[in-house]
Amino acid sequence: MRGVRVPLLAWFGVLALAFVAYLPALRVGWVLDDTWNIVSNPALHWTEISAEGFRQVREQTLNSGRDAANLSFALNHLVGGLDPFGFHLVNVLIHLLVGTALLWLAWEYLQSVPVADLPSRRAWMAAVVPAALFLVHPLNTQAVTYVVQRMASLAALFCVLSLAAYLRGRREPRAGRAVAWFVVAALAWALALGSKENAAALPLVVLVWEWCFRRAQWVDRWRRAAPLAKVGVAAVVSVSVVGVGRVVWRYVGGPARWLETLPARDFSPLERVLTQARVNLTYLGQLVWPAPGSLNLDHDVVVSRGLLDPITTLPAVLFWVVAVGGAVVLARRKPLLGFPLLAYVGFHLVEAGPLNLELMHEHRMYLPMTMLALFGTATLVTVRVPRWRMVLAGAGTVATALGVLTFTRNALWADPIAFHRDIAEKSPKKARAHGLLASALLEADRPLDAIAPAERAVELEPDYKALMTLGDVYLAAERFVDAEARYRQAVELAPRAFEAEYRIGLVLEQVGDTAAAYEHFTRIGVEFGMAGAAFEAIYPLERAVRLRPGSSEAHNHLGNAYALAGRADKALAEYRRAVELDGRNAEALYNLARTEERAGNSAAALEHYRRFLEVAPPSLARPRAQAAARIRELGSALAAPRVP
């Protein structure tokens, strides 16, 4: 144990350095996908642990297949509500756990393929150095500081644990314990799949390890196997290939679909795969030189329309062909070095495939980077480092520099305006980047500064969201005519869009045209109510009541909205107020009578049904007939003697 005491003490120092590098991340608020995945997702807002809560996590979340990650968000809310501090703290702790799990994986990797004349202390040092650089590398900030990307960091944690447990079981001489480790590996992989789908590549990585280090044993077993056993294995492999093929066909489609534009994208599956050759080279560039100017939350990537469009596509494709081929050759000759490189490629396959995903996000490097750290460990034990003190001193210097860059990057994340301005400057042709900057400035009560980026967003992409942001900016800047025009454009693009319709009413109210505002709020409230959108109906109708508190019609409509939403007590109060204001409002009288009856107030219901028949015009034939029938039934019930 003395031989590993120094590396372990050094590891605690690394954890402390990494935690300090992520201290500014604890002050970051909610960003982009955090809002609709967590903040606006009631299924994750646990206040107690219950079976119903687990069901909602499984069935009522945006990423319903990522149960492990969603459950962690629900538990976060259970402890600290929607305070982002707690969510960020858990993300940082998960990152530290990933680094520690990576340290264990590196140790198991070296033990599963013993390196001659390698003392335990040097093995631990070789494991600590790359894991330390992984923990403090600024390229990982997106996976750690961006709360929702806990999905990526959890998937990496469980994948690393699963692979380490598998290697531990593979070198366990006792069958019972080996099986136990394999069960642990399977459970960890299941949790990884429940965090993010890129964990599906782990079985492929395990097969690559078997090919690298146990190939001769499998060949020998195959030669000695009975013919019937060979037939069985061939059948299992065939069924597996067919099953995988069907899954690929289902999600990717046949050759024709590779040329079709993906939904809500401007590229096809083939174009995405070609683009990924360039994107993955960019990731490697960021890994080697993580300058602040190269890191971005929302990259603006030029799509590869062909091998020569842009011209850099062909060299990138050739690079990866040569790199993968070289890794295969290296794996055959020096598997200790070759396996991590092939595993790195394997963990990139899912998100670099022909799927309907954004072209580039830095958190996609998080899991593959663990394999590069493993490659670093293999390199350190292969080159036979003569002076470990120099290596540790150099690694410490690099780790400190990376930690400073990570701290700086996290400090940028903690300043919403500076952060979104940074994105807009790095992706000047992306409408979303300018729109988010405008929203950040608007939230900081700087509407005049928000006008330029909001207008730029609409200029680049005049979609509903950009128009709404610009309308909000104009409204806050008191440019009411311009705000109304933008909201009406948004309604043209998305009819019955509640937010746009509601804001048009707010504009009319702001300019002092209360009559038009009242008519607008009433109209859209009734329309949303007739469409079954209860909560969308309530807000404008509440606004209408504020504008005309003496309007019997407004109170009646609001009562209808409350009734549709299942809020019977509020509906009853509004109907009573409507009748109080206008005793001849037939619709309000009928609604009040029905609501009183449902509430068990039979005498009051009978009285209102009678008053309704007195004022209701003949055109309301059906309600009149129903009211007459209810009067007879209620009258008989009230007149019947009570049984003591």
Image: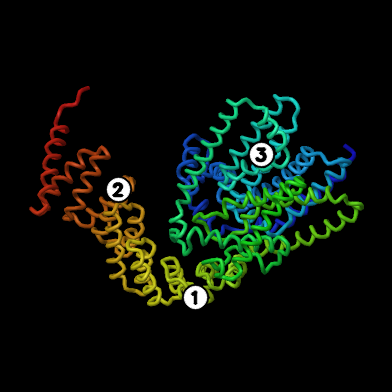
Specify whether 156 is left or right of 54.
right
- Where does the image place residue 304, in percent across and percent down from the top left? 54, 66
Colouring scheme applied when the structure was drawn: rainbow
Name the residue type under label 1.
Arg
Q: What's the distance in space between the residues labelled 2 and 1, CA to CA?
A: 43 Å
Q: Is residue 509 visible?
A: no
Q: Residues within 10 Å of mark 2 (few under 14, many from 20)?
A: some
- Where does the image place residue 190, in percent across and percent down from the top left? 58, 38
The residue wearing badge 2 is: 563
Specify whether 608 is left or right of 484.
left
The reply to whether dot 2 and dot 1 touch (C-beta < 8 Å) is: no
Q: Which image quarter is the N terminus in?
A: top right
The residue wearing badge 1 is: 456
SS class, disc 3: helix
SS class, disc 1: helix
Classify residue 462 by image quadrant: bottom left
Q: What's the distance in space between the residues labelled 3 and 1, CA to CA?
A: 47 Å
Name the residue type under label 2.
Ala
Q: Which image quarter is the C terminus in?
A: top left
Tell me which label, 3 or 1, sits earlier in the chain.
3
SS class, disc 2: helix
Q: Nearer the viewer, mark 3 or mark 1?
A: 3
Q: Residues within 10 Å of mark 1 (few under 14, many from 20)?
A: many
Q: Nearer the viewer, residue 545 or 38?
A: 38
Q: Is residue 395 visible?
A: yes
Name the residue type under label 3.
Ser
Q: Residues within 10 Å of mark 3 (few under 14, many from 20)?
A: many
Q: Residue at x 59, y 71 (%)?
A: 311
Q: Is residue 390 above or below residue 56?
A: below
Q: Is residue 179 above or below residue 124?
A: above
- Where does the image place residue 170, in percent across and percent down from the top left? 72, 33
The residue wearing badge 3 is: 162
